Amino acid sequence: MMAHKFSPQSIERLLSEERCNAVKPHQFLRDCGLDAGMTVADVGCGPGFFTVPASNIVGRKGLVYAIDVQEEMIRILKRRTRRKNIVPLLSKEHRIPLDARTVDFALLAYVLHEAEDKFKFLKEVKRIMKKGARIVVLDWKKKREKEGPPFAERLALKDARRLVEEAGLSVDRVSSFGSSHYIISALK
Ligand code: SAM
């Protein structure tokens, strides 16, 4: 079964004030260890809900690669912001157009459950991470809810954690984020 991709037609859901108040993306990224001067990969960036706050945190000496497989998402992101420290990149399903060991921090926000081959995808993200870089996976808990992706498309925390570990990343923090989401934080 082809993994379902979030439709660019529904981006207002990703950019709503309600979501911003609930997630507080700036605070979220700070709490995850994002800091000034870092090079970040926002993999599966969509219209840039996390990309823009990430660019505020890393500042002029840092860089945010905003990466997505959907051309329409990249187009929308470019329309929303033209900041010098944001580099939008169109990727392939399991191929990110960056050299190995480029980033200090990789964010996978609500994207792992959409990847066709989750293991291959994580290995590819690991490839672009520097040694000692951090990866943060934020995704939906495997439960039936009105909001969010259908139950069948969700990836359980234990399965996501196993995949991250099998990809060769060292998990050092796992937590709940609100009642619907989980965070897995790991180092290369
Ligand atoms: N991270 C953003 C956020 O939280 O607002 C967007 C989340 S949206 C639910 C998931 C995004 O991941 C979509 O824009 C989709 O195109 C992208 N995506 C799905 N599979 C991907 C892959 N293999 N590589 C890169 N991006 C992918």
Image (cartoon, helix red, strand yellow):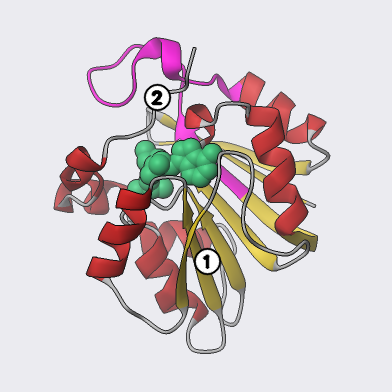
Report the residue marked by disc 2: 4
Residue at point 51%, 78% (across, down): 58
Badge count? 2
Which badge, 2 or 1, comes first in the chain's sequence? Answer: 2
Quadrant assignment, res 116: top right
Residue at point 52%, 59% (across, down): 31
Front-most of residues 77 and 106: 77
Task: Judge from the rendering whether residue 169 lies leftward or rightward of residue 16; answer left or right.
Answer: right
State which image quarter holds ligand 1: top left
The region drawn magenta spans 136-157
Task: Judge from the rendering whether residue 20 lies leftward or rightward of residue 181; answer left or right.
Answer: left
Report the residue marked by disc 1: 65
Q: Which amino acid does the dot numbered 2 rest on?
A: His
Front-most of residues 35 and 108: 108
Q: Which amino acid does the dot numbered 1 rest on?
A: Tyr
Crowding near the residue tagged with mark 2, few <14, some 14–19, many ≥20 C-alpha atoms within 10 Å: few
SS at circle 1: strand
Residue at point 16%, 46% (across, down): 12
Q: Specify whether residue 99 is painted magenta.
A: no
Task: Judge from the rendering whether residue 161 lies leftward or rightward of residue 93; answer left or right.
Answer: right
SS at circle 2: loop
